[in-house]
Structure formats: C-alpha cells, structure tokens
C-alpha cells in the first residue's frame, strides 16, 4: 500500500522522489534519521525500495538466488555471505549477489570483491553472460542505481544503520527468485518476511541469538523458511552441524585486509575454522535452493567442495569471466 502521509507535509512517494532528486547531502542524512525515528519505518523503506528498483539500469534474470545480510552487527566477521555465494555457485546455484562498499567501514561485500580485483563494470548482456558462464555475478548497488550513490555521503554522516542497510536485500535489480536474508534481530525480519511472501518468492530470513546476521558458528540461529506462500520456523544449532562451536576470535578481524585474507583462506580450505563458518552458511542456501533436504548433508557437501579445491578454481573462473567484458 502506498501511503499519502509520508515524512513531512507531502505524500510519501513525492517526498522520497524529491529527496532523491533535489536535496543536499545534509537533507538526505536528515531524511535517513527521520526514517530511523519513524513509527512506520517498514512502510517508508518498502516505498523507497519500489522507487529504487524502478530506477535500476539492470533488469530481472530468472532463476537466480542471493545471499545477503543487512550488515552492521559489529562482529567483524569475515565476508561470509559473499564467500558462501562463491561456494553455492560452484555447486550449481546461479547467484546474482547484490552489495555495496561498507558505509561505516571498509569491509563491505564490494570491498572484498575489490580486494579480489573483480570487474564491477557490466551491462545487462554482460550480467547475463556472467551468470551463464560462471553462475555468479556481483551487482554493485551504486553502479547500477544512482539512488545508492546519491546517498553515499549521507550514510557516512550517520554512525548507525540506516534504511539503506535494509534496502540492499530487496532492491537487487536481478530480482532473485530465492533469497537468504540475514538480519540482526527478529523485529527487522518482518520487513523481509513480508517482502518474500508478497512477491511470491522462496527463501529464508535468519537472525542469530548472538546478534549475528549470518548463520552463527557458536550460537543458535533462528530461521524463518518461506515457500509457496507459507512460513515455518527452525533453529540451527551449530554444534549439531559442525560438531563443535567456533569462537568468534577464529573468524573475525577488525582489519579489512586481514579479514579478506582470512575469507580467501576459508574459501581455499587452508583455514579450517573459516571454511566451516562459510560452509554452514552455504548449506542453508543450498537447502532453500532445493539442492539438499537437510542441513547436515548440505554442510558436508559444501565443506567437501571447499576442501577439494573446486571453490578456489571456481573463484578463478568467476574473475576470468568478469574480466572478459
């Protein structure tokens, strides 16, 4: 439903379009602050998402999936969503990964892809080719929708999560059919549950008891599974899947380059703890994409794919395909 009582004295849609097209960075920052303080933030974010998707320069691709967290959980973990996306795409799931550079740090998914020297430049034809040839494409949010770029400075003015932390997962221009969405607590999950249900998609929303927006390797993770218009719940106990808990000190670093190198080691299988953390997140994506029925089998297969070197080879292919534009 589109509200006619938005922030300020004008209809919500008109207010958002005016902010996008005719405001200073300071005004944009104030708009983001107002959303944070609003009692109908979900409605505003949904309307903003609609407008952003309408303006995207890339368009839908059938049969793709995405794995993305809202970020900002302050855990400093490795780039596990992106890493898990590499694993599942190596195992035959087509991934259109939507992401951005970190707003309050240099550890966003795009920062990691830049570290890997991924080529962000592409048009619709190149996007289709990357998905076809390597089952993976990374869509840099501000490159293909200037709404994100327009808010880049404003976001940095606010030392907290903003609406744009929540918009990324629901503004992917490839419009994935299957979504694995990570949030930091249950309240935020309702926005994404409604999005998946209303848009007749399949997927899950996850939130860990420790506040991580990933499948945690040391605390239980709550999962809301959504399929065919119905929602159900399950809990992932990492000890039951991995065999033991993995302390956060083994999968995190406050230094971006150290974190990126650890992520790569996990993908190459040379760091066991990082590899297991990546594998348990990849496992859930494999389950919701219908590749496996249960988490245990999916986890074992994901870890074996990493250990065999197939993921490392796949990453090299992804980079080669992306450079051939």
Image: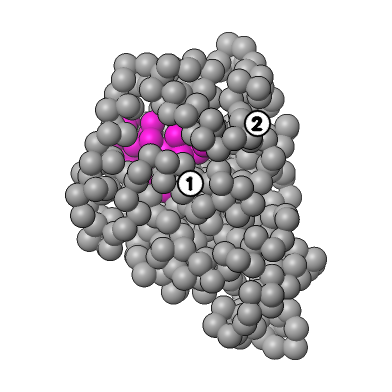
Q: Is residue 90 above or below residue 301?
A: below
User: Looking at the image, which residue is at 29% across and 24% down?
Assistant: 310
Which residue appears farthest toward the bottom when viewing the image?
9
Where, quadrant-wise, is the C terminus in this rendering?
bottom left
Q: Is residue 71 visible?
A: yes
Q: Residue at x 38, y 22 (%)?
A: 268
Q: Position of residue 256 (x, y in %)?
A: 55, 38
Looking at the rendering, the stretch of residues picked out in magenta corresponds to 79-97
Q: How many marks?
A: 2
Picture residue at 28% right of the left edge, 41% below the top: 319
**Residue 223 visible in the snapshot:** no
- The residue identified by callout 1 is 111
Residue at the top extreme of this rendering: 243
Disc 2 designates what residue?
A: 221
Indicate the quadrant where residue 297 lies.
top left
- Between the residue at mark 2 and the residue at mark 1, the CA separation in whole angstroms equals 26 Å
Image check: 127 left or right of 257? left
Callout 1 crowding tier (Cα within 10 Å): few <14, some 14–19, many ≥20: many
């Amino acid at each position: 439903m589109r509200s006619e009582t938005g922030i300020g004295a004008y209809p919500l849609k008109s207010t958002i379009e005016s902010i996008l097209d005719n405001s200073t960075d300071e005004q944009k920052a104030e708009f983001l602050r107002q959303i944070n303080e609003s009692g109908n933030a979900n409605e505003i974010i949904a309307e903003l998402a609609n407008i952003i998707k309408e303006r995207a320069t890339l368009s839908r691709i059938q049969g793709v999936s995405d794995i993305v967290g809202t970020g900002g959980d302050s855990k400093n973990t490795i780039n596990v969503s992106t890493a898990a996306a590499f694993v599942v795409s190596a195992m035959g799931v087509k991934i259109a990964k939507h992401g951005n550079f970190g707003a309050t740090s240099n550890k966003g998914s795009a920062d990691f892809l830049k570290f890997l020297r991924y080529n962000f430049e592409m048009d619709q034809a190149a996007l289709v080719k990357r998905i076809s040839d390597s089952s993976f494409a990374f869509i840099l949010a501000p490159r293909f929708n200037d709404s994100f770029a327009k808010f880049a400075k404003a976001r940095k003015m606010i030392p907290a999560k903003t609406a744009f932390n929540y918009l990324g997962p629901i503004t992917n221009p490839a419009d994935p059919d299957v979504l694995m969405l990570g949030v930091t607590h249950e309240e935020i999950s309702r926005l994404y549950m409604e999005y998946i249900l209303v848009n007749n998609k399949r997927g899950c929303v996850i939130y860990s008891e420790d506040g991580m927006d990933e499948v945690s390797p040391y605390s239980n993770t709550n999962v809301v599974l959504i399929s065919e218009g119905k929602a159900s719940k399950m809990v992932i106990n990492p000890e039951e899947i991995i065999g033991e808990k993995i302390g956060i000190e083994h999968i995190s670093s406050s230094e971006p380059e150290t974190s990126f190198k650890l992520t790569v080691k996990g993908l190459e299988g040379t760091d066991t703890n990082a590899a297991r953390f990546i594998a348990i997140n990849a496992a859930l994506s494999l389950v919701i994409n219908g590749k496996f029925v249960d988490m245990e089998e999916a986890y074992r297969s994901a870890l074996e794919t990493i250990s065999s070197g197939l993921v490392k080879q796949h990453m090299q292919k992804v980079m080669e395909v992306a450079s051939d534009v």
